[in-house]
Amino acid sequence: MKEKLIELLFKYKDAFATDKEPLGSIIGNEVDIILNVEKTYPPLLRRPAYPASPRAREALEVHIKESIDLGLLRKVGHNEKLEITTPVIITWHNGKSRMVGDFRALNT
């Protein structure tokens, strides 16, 4: 079973990002997502940042900077009414962390 899995992973190795080939936009296949933000979201949907420890905040800053550098995220001006997501850090037991977005306001 393990050998079949390894064989399958090698067969589709181009589908995975590595340190040599980081995540980012696939050139020629970019997708523009246009959001309808004619109205501001109700105050109940606009959420403040979740409480986080200094360690979690530091990890969040690292993830956000990496995502901006890779072109996965872009900064939005503070005067734009796009308060549609709140970044959240999930920390695994092994100490590694992962950033996810809370998009409840967008999906409402």
Image: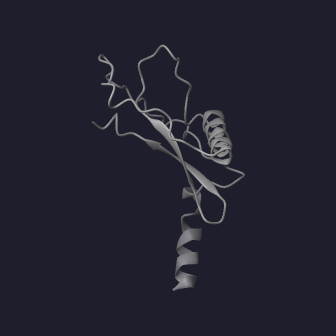
> Can you name the residue that lies furthest to the left here?
108
Q: What colouring style does the render use? A: one colour
Picture coordinates of residue 89 (x, y %)? 55, 48
Picture coordinates of residue 32 (x, y %)? 42, 29
Q: Quadrant of residue 33?
A: top left
Identity of the residue drawn at 27% across and 36% down: 108
Q: Is residue 17 left or right of residue 105?
A: right
Q: Is residue 12 above or below residue 90?
A: below
> Can you name the residue that lies furthest to the bottom here?
1
Q: Is residue 83 left or right of residue 96?
A: left
Count of numbered circles in the view? 0
Q: Is residue 100 above or below residue 35?
A: below
Q: Nearer the viewer, residue 17 or 8?
A: 17
Identity of the residue drawn at 54% across and 57% down: 15
> Can you name the residue that lies furthest to the right here?
20
Picture coordinates of residue 50 (x, y %)? 50, 40
Picture coordinates of residue 19 (x, y %)? 71, 53
Q: Nearer the viewer, residue 64 or 55?
A: 55
